[in-house]
Amino acid sequence: LDFDRAFREGIVVADDVLVLHVIYRTHSQCARLGLSISKRVGNAPARNRWKRLIREVFRKSRQNLPAIDIVA
């Protein structure tokens, strides 16, 4: 997963809590997730909890997603 490319060229989708950078890929069949949680979210346990929650949502919905890279 190329984080720099996602930040530079990705489509940005955001709300009050979460910012997603999304890039469509043509050479793959599955979606991929990369996490970059800011220290503004809180201390390490708070950031780890966010990561666990985001990974679980991604895991449950992965089969319904097109071939994209998501950086949250």
Image: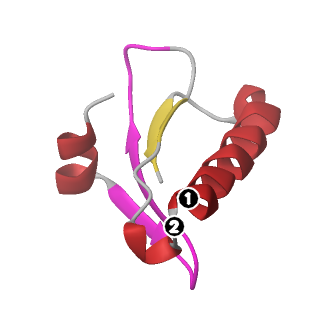
Magenta residues (range): 11-28
Residue 26 percent coordinates (x, y): 38, 22
Residue displayed at 38% across by 28% down:
25
Along the horizontal axis of the image, is 59 left or right of 6?
Answer: right
Contact (CB < 8 A) between labels 2 and 1?
A: yes
Residue displayed at 82% across by 35% down:
60
Along the horizontal axis of the image, is 5 left or right of 67?
Answer: left
Which sits in the foreground, 1 or 67?
1
Along the horizontal axis of the image, is 4 left or right of 42?
Answer: left
Give how far apart the Cα atoms at labels 2 and 1 are: 6 Å
Check residue 47 in the rendering and tell me which mark sits there, or answer none.
Answer: 1
Q: Check disc 1 and report its element: helix, strand or loop.
A: helix
Looking at the image, the residue that sits furthest to the right is 60
Residue 68 percent coordinates (x, y): 48, 34
Asked if 61 appears above or below 67 in the picture, the reply is: below
Which sits in the foreground, 50 or 71?
50
Asked if 22 appears above or below 34 in the picture, the reply is: below
Q: Amino acid at mark 1?
A: Arg
Q: Which residue is mark 2?
A: 43
Looking at the rendered image, the quarter that the N terminus falls into is top left
Q: Amino acid at mark 2?
A: Asn
Asked if 32 appears above or below 14 in the picture, the reply is: above
Residue displayed at 27% across by 41% down:
3
The number of numbered badges drawn on the structure is 2
The 10 Å Cα crowd at callout 2, few under 14, some 14 to 19, many 20 or more, is few
